């Protein structure tokens, strides 16, 4: 037949057409995924059609974004794309800098002027809060991994001067009577000695590395005795590929081991019921079911929640580090980002009650704040420079 003869003259085009038709058929009959385990994020769902949205060109754009995230063999295509980019010797994949020794670094903003308004707002909010709060107010900002481990970067990417900004922030806070805790010296010294401060595939600090150093630094600043959990409670979970891996999908990445301390303390997480009422859901410190997913870090404090109340050890260990030092006030409010999730459990040795608050999910703290409570603002530098919810503290 003439048509078949013509097709035979262009075998590659014919094969491509067949593959395209097969992919389309499979794509139509394959159920949509609402969540990507590989990237640890929710995927776009099919947008509802309306004539108004079509006329305003909203539906077309939303549908285009939906199609980009819902197609057959999506994870395999993403891995293949990442592998090809690595073959081109790229130093950045998916907003992640590829580093030496298996490190993947979250890309940080390079233009200080773009984050300065948020920085100024957050500093003012903390200063106003410290003026009105009778208890001790501490601020601990976690330097970025690319700052502490800059020697592990394969190149010198354009970055803002993080150290200069931190110096200025700490200076302004100190002038307002806030106790600042600078982790940079301890982190660099420990990293130089071979300790793993941050995960290689994730943007968070390690529990027995960065978070433990931060706990010791906090206790020193607060006049408390740092109580390190016994090695018998130290547990590890293998196969951890973190957020930086989910963005870069680096074919050569090796899995991290996630470390946690299996403390017996309990917590209560603030939840919202279907009828709009608020209740507290009790449970253990760790959500062990998360270890079976890609979101293993989400096991700490059961993930990101607006308010989590942790039961401490009755203040039995809240003794002064030296003569004349002050003991813990009995309660502490930790205003934090996700870095605080693996840090807060350490405080159970020093306080009767620990309130962990994420301002992205809870806009007020006055109803959980005692007049004499200690308050710790614990943020990663990158989050502190971009968080538009912290202003509510002031």
Image: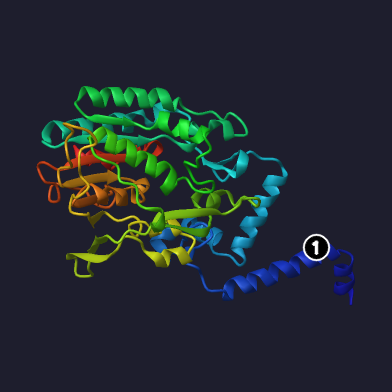
Q: In which quarter of the image is residue 381?
A: top left
> What residue sits 80% from the left and 63% below the top?
13
The structure residue drawn at horizontal position 47% and vertical position 54%, both measured from the top left corner, is: 258
Disc 1 crowd rating (10 Å Cα; few below 14, some 14-19, many 20+) is: few
Judged left or right of residue 73, residue 124 is left
Residue 56 in view (yes/no): no
Q: Quadrant of residue 47?
A: bottom left
Image-based side of 331 in relation to 64, left or right: left
Which residue shows up at 19% across the image and 32% down it? 323
Question: Measured from the top left, where is residue 325 in percent x and y?
Answer: 18, 33
Whether residue 114 is situated above or below residue 31 in the rendered picture: above
Q: Position of residue 121 (x, y in %)?
A: 27, 32
- For the N terminus, the image quarter is bottom right
Location of the C terminus by quadrant is: top left
Q: Which colour scheme is used?
A: rainbow
Most extreme residue toward the front is 323
Q: How many marks?
A: 1
Q: Is mark 1 on a helix, strand or loop?
A: helix
For label 1, the residue is 13
Q: Where is residue 122 in the image (x, y as percent from the top left)?
A: 27, 34
Answer whether residue 116 is visible to the viewer in this image: yes
- Going by the image, does 121 lie left or right of 100? left
Q: Is residue 108 above or below residue 52?
A: above
Q: In terms of image quadrants, where is residue 319? A: top left
Which residue is found at the position 49% from the left and 51% from the top? 243
Image location of residue 304, percent across then percent down? 34, 55
């Amino acid at each position: 037949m003439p048509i078949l003869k013509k097709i035979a003259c262009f075998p590659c085009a014919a094969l491509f057409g067949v593959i395209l038709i097969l992919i389309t058929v499979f794509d139509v009959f394959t159920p949509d995924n609402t969540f990507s385990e590989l990237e640890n994020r929710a995927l776009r769902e099919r947008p509802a059609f309306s004539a108004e949205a079509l006329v305003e060109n909203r539906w077309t754009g939303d549908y285009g974004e939906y199609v980009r995230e819902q197609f057959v063999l999506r994870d395999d295509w993403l891995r293949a794309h990442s592998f090809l980019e690595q073959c081109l010797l790229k130093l950045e994949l998916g907003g992640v800098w590829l580093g030496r020794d298996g490190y993947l670094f979250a890309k940080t903003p390079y233009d200080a002027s773009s984050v300065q308004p948020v920085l100024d707002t957050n500093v003012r909010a903390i200063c106003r809060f410290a003026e009105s709060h009778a208890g001790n107010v501490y601020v601990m900002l976690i330097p970025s991994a690319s700052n502490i481990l800059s020697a592990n970067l394969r190149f010198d990417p354009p970055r803002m001067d993080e150290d200069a900004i931190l110096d200025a922030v700490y200076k302004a806070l100190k002038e307002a009577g806030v106790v600042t805790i600078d982790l940079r010296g301890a982190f660099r010294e420990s990293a130089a000695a071979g300790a793993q401060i941050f995960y290689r595939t994730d943007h968070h600090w390690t529990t027995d590395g960065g978070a433990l150093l931060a706990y010791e630094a906090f206790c020193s600043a607060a006049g408390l005795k740092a109580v390190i959990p016994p090695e018998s409670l130290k547990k590890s979970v293998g196969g951890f590929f973190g957020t930086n891996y989910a963005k870069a999908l680096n074919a050569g990445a090796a899995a991290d081991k996630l470390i946690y301390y299996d403390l017996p303390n309990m917590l209560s997480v603030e939840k919202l019921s279907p009828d709009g009422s608020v209740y507290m859901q009790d449970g253990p410190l760790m959500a062990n079911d998360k270890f079976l997913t890609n979101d293993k870090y989400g096991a700490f404090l059961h993930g990101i929640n607006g308010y989590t109340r942790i039961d401490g050890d009755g203040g039995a260990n809240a003794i002064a580090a030296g003569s004349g030092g002050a003991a813990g006030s009995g309660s502490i409010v930790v205003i934090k980002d996700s870095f605080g999730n693996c840090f807060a459990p350490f405080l159970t040795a020093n306080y009767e009650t620990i309130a962990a608050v994420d301002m992205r999910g809870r806009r007020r703290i006055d109803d959980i704040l005692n007049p004499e409570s200690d308050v710790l603002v614990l943020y990663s530098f990158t989050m502190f420079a971009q968080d538009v919810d912290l202003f509510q503290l002031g």
